[in-house]
Image (spheres, helix red, strand yellow):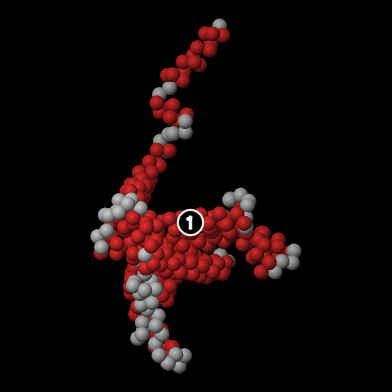
Amino acid sequence: MSATAASPQAVTPARMSLRQRLAARGIDSITLLVLPALLALVGLFVYPFIYGLIVSFAPKVGPFYENYHKFFSDPFLRSTIWHTLALAFPTTLLSILLALPIAFRVRLMRRQRTLTTILLLPMTLGTVLVAQGLLTYLGPHGWFNRVLMLLHISGRPLELTNNYWGVFASLVLTGFPFTFLLTLSYVSGIDPALEEAAATLGGGAWNRFMRIFLPLLAPGLAVTFCLSFVQSFSVFPSAVLLGAPAGSTHVIAIAAYQAAFEQYNYSLGSAIAMIMGGVQLVIVIAVLASRQLFYRGPVGGTKG
């Protein structure tokens, strides 16, 4: 009887359909919805990356590493890394420093959605339109210089375009809304009861921020920094329209474009793009690793 009773249980798995067997392994119709996103990821990122990496090791002349040797041995090309970092780091830090106090204030306001919408407007304008507007506003005959001279603050127009500061202003204007939106989501996710408890124990505003908010915000701010940094590091239109493409704002994206589409050296352009991605990856890994110095608790909960 025991053998007869056990036989249906042994036969049942063999009679299961393919759909049932896949569902037992966690693969069902809902899981298959990930396939379009996976195909898009492979088609838009994985394949271009692998193709670009292969092309970068196929120079026109010389050994397979010739493109990388040419980049790092040429001071003009090598300096593009520092020019880009000199723009990306300060603009990202300034955006976060501006976003933090504004986010703390906005989270307590009744008309939070209205103010948030106003602050996000520069994001909808686009980089090129913002650059064109700054050329008119910050130019030698723009409104900003006119006001300074009218108030006798400056005797001559300030040089705020076609140099480093024009690109800096453009990156802050276009990057701040994105940074602010991310920062606001993390700040709003912190339980107000924590701050109230610290206040009842005599903690001042600065102590509450340093001992409660900053440790809880550190992981979120690290992610915000990384996303904002990558956005600023890939600067191209602003560096051309508002900066000095042959001088202080000769960023690495411009070098890659010139190699590929002006010199028609696609192999060198791919190598520069790979170096650009490698620098970003190193910075992102370093920032994400450093967040463990502030907070080692769970990701969820009061951090949002």
What residue type is disc 1 on? Val
Q: Give the residue displayed 26% in from the left and 54% down from the top.
A: 60
Residues 62 and 98: in front is 62
| Rendered view: 17 above or below 81 | above
Residues 150 and 262: in front is 262
Q: Give the residue displayed 50% in from the left and 12% down from the top.
A: 7
User: Where, by quadrant of the figure, is residue 121 drawn?
Assistant: bottom left
Q: Which residue is mark 1?
A: 282
**Which quarter shows the N terminus?**
top right
| Rendered view: 183 above or below 145 | above
Most extreme residue toward the front is 62
Q: Give the residue displayed 51% in from the left and 70% down from the top.
A: 94
Q: Position of residue 23 (x, y in %)?
A: 45, 30
Q: Give the residue displayed 37% in from the left and 65% down from the top.
A: 74
Q: Position of residue 163 (x, y in %)?
A: 38, 77
Q: Position of residue 167 (x, y in %)?
A: 40, 73
Residue 277 visible to an observer of this rendering: yes
Residue 115 visible to an observer of this rendering: no
| Rendered view: 111 above or below 145 | above
Which SS class for mark 1?
Answer: helix
